[in-house]
Image (spheres, rainbow, N blue to C red):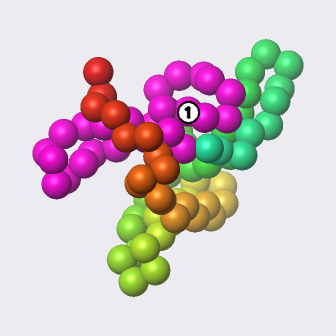
Amino acid sequence: MASFLEDSDEQTPTPAFDCAANRWVTLDIKYKTTKHTDRITRDFPHGRSCGIVFDPKRQLLWGTDTNSQIYVLRLDARAANIKPLE
């Protein structure tokens, strides 16, 4: 959720660790984006000062960035197009 591998519109390969399979994978997660003149900015916690935690009771991923913005993701792994990281 806090990192992506390449620019590709709103669907972006996002690295994740699959604990059950003991391997790195990519997930296709759709982000809210803002287009600037020379780049697309994704609205999610990223950079050097961000934090992410999993809330098992609600099955949510909570994230925050250096500006204290809060982001929430309910991941549907079946719809995330999971692929091994190559």
x, y (%) of residue 52? 44, 59
Q: How far from the left and from the top, in percent, is residue 19?
A: 19, 53
Tell me: 34 left or right of 80.
Answer: right
The range drawn in magenta is 1-29
Residue 37 sits above or below residue 67 on the image:
above
**Residue drawn where x is 34% and y is 34% of the image:** 83
Please provide percent x and percent y for residue 24: 25, 37
Q: Where is residue 20 in the image (x, y as percent from the top left)?
A: 16, 54
Please identify the residue farthest to the front as the structure is shown: 78
Instruction: Name which residue type carries label 1.
Output: Thr
If the image is split into quadrants, where does the C terminus sit? Answer: top left
In this rendering, would 71 be left or right of 36? left
Q: Which residue is drawn at 62% across and 23% down?
A: 8
Determine the image quadrant of residue 15. Answer: top left
Q: Is residue 44 one of those drawn in magenta?
A: no
The residue nearer to you, when weighing 30 against 63, is 30
Count of all numbered marks drawn on residues in the image: 1
The answer to whether 35 is drawn above or below residue 52 in the figure is above
User: Which residue is pictured at 60% across the width and 35% down the height?
Assistant: 11
* Nearer to me, 24 or 41: 24
Foreground residue among 68 and 42: 42
Q: Which residue is drawn at 54% across and 61% down?
A: 73
- Residue furthest bottom in the image: 57
Left or right: residue 12 versus residue 56 is right
Secondary-structure class at tag 1 = strand
| Disc 1: which residue | 12
